[in-house]
Image: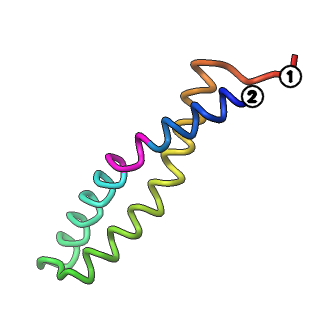
């Protein structure tokens, strides 16, 4: 059980930065296209914090499902 949880957390930590950058880039482009202008620094910072918040949950979910498929559900016996 400890190995499973540890592997989920390590993979989620490794995926956090690239996933947050990807989500940030997509959301900034979408917002720029929607309002037809470049975003200022405050708006970009807001999108960055939003992307980081979203990427925490997405990376944990992906990591759990990946390890569940790779290792299997941990049992106590």
Let me know if residue 74 is in the magenta part.
no
Q: x, y (%) of residue 11?
A: 49, 35
Dot 2 lies on which element?
loop
What secondary structure prevails in the magenta region?
Answer: helix
Query: Is 37 placed left or right of 25 in the picture?
Result: left
Dot 1 lies on which element?
loop
Question: Disc 2, disc 1: CB below 8 Å?
Answer: yes
Q: Dividing the image into 4 quarters, which one contains the N terminus? A: top right
Q: x, y (%) of residue 59?
A: 49, 45
Let me know if residue 16 is in the magenta part.
yes
Which of 76/27 is in front? 76
Q: x, y (%) of residue 55?
A: 44, 54
Query: Is 23 placed left or right of 31 in the picture?
Result: right
Q: CA distance from mark 2 to mark 1?
A: 8 Å
Give the magenta-colored segment's residue range.
Answer: 14-19
Q: Dividing the image into 4 quarters, which one contains the C terminus? A: top right
**Residue on which disc 2 sits:** 1
Q: How is the image coloured?
A: rainbow
Neighbor class of circle 2 (other Cα within 10 Å; few <14, some 14-19, many 20+) is few
Residue shown at the point (41%, 68%) measured from the top left: 50
**Eyeballing the image, is 6 above or below 33?**
above
Residue 76 - label = 1
Q: Tell me which corner region of the image, top left, top right, bottom left or bottom right, holds residue 73.
A: top right
Which of 77/35 is in front? 77
**Eyeballing the image, is 19 above or below 27?**
above
Query: Residue at the right extreme?
Result: 77
Residue shown at the point (33%, 68%) measured from the top left: 48
Query: Is 44 placed left or right of 63 in the picture?
Result: left
Q: Tell me which corner region of the image, top left, top right, bottom left or bottom right, holds residue 37.
A: bottom left
Q: x, y (%) of residue 14?
A: 41, 40
Residue shown at the point (46%, 44%) measured from the top left: 13
Residue shown at the point (30%, 60%) measured from the top left: 24
């Amino acid at each position: 059980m400890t190995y499973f949880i540890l592997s989920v957390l390590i993979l989620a930590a490794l995926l956090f930065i690239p996933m947050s950058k990807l989500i940030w880039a997509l959301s900034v482009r979408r917002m720029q296209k929607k309002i037809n202008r470049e975003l200022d620094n405050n708006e970009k910072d807001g999108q960055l914090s939003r992307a980081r918040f979203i990427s925490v949950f997405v990376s944990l979910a992906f990591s759990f499902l990946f390890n569940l498929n790779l290792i299997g559900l941990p049992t106590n016996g």
